[in-house]
Amino acid sequence: LYKARGKAGIRPHQESIKRFKDRIRQITSRKRGRSIQQTLKELKMFTTGWLGYFAIADIKSRIIALNEWTRRRIRMYLWKQWKKISARFKNLKRLGITKGKAWEWANTRKGYWRIANSWISSRSLTNEYLASIGYDDISKRYEALHSNH
């Protein structure tokens, strides 16, 4: 509970947010060796339950930030799966990146987490692409659930 501008509100404790992020880290761990579809299915099950519990809270800005962070985790997971340069090159071309840029980006030395937040992944692994492979946008689901309360 909190009080702002003379009104009381509900928000999750910092520890609850930390546990949410820890669970997302566990689901999107790079060493799990699962397909992206299995990972996204497990992620959807977890976030659906979490949002069902916290939908009554006033956490729109927090949900937007968590959604961005979760998408970055998924981009990192995909980049890790495309471990070899040839796989990165092939997948980047498949996503519509030109041959020259795909070769340049496939040969980057940057780490997985840094690439996940880079221009490379924002141009190739777009939000639309993530939705097409099964990522369920957390902020849209929160809006739908929160409007019912």
Image: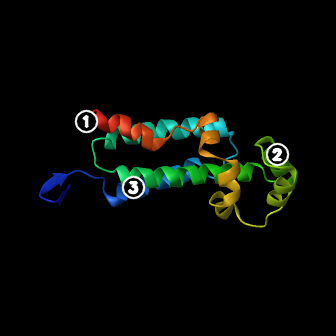
Residue name at image x 23 percent, y 50 percent:
10
Q: Comparing marks 3 and 1, which lies closer to the viewer?
A: 1
On the image, the x and y values in percent for residue 80 come to 72, 53
User: Which tag, 1 or 2, sits closer to the chain's start?
Assistant: 2
Residue type beneath disc 1 = His
Mark 3 is surrounded, within 10 Å at the Cα level, by few (under 14), some (14 to 19) or many (20 or more) other residues, namely: some
- The answer to which of 6 and 44 lies nearer the viewer is 6
On the image, the x and y values in percent for residue 2 come to 20, 58
Q: How far apart are marks 1 and 2 (CA)?
A: 45 Å
The tag on residue 134 is: none
Residue type beneath disc 3 = Ile
* Element under disc 3: helix
Q: Name the residue under label 1.
A: 149
Residue 31 visible, this orientation? no
Residue name at image x 28 percent, y 52 percent:
11
Q: Mark 2 points at which residue?
A: 93
Residue 17 visible, this orientation? yes
Q: Distance between the residues labelled 3 and 2?
A: 37 Å
- The answer to which of 59 and 22 lies nearer the viewer is 59
Q: Mark 3 points at which residue?
A: 17
* Element under disc 2: helix
Farthest residue toward the top?
A: 148
Q: Do the residues labelled 1 and 2 touch (CB within 8 Å)?
A: no
Residue type beneath disc 2 = Lys
Farthest residue toward the left?
A: 6
* Element under disc 1: loop
Q: Are marks 3 and 1 in contact (CB under 8 Å)?
A: no
Q: Are marks 3 and 2 in contact (CB under 8 Å)?
A: no
Quadrant placement of the N terminus: bottom left
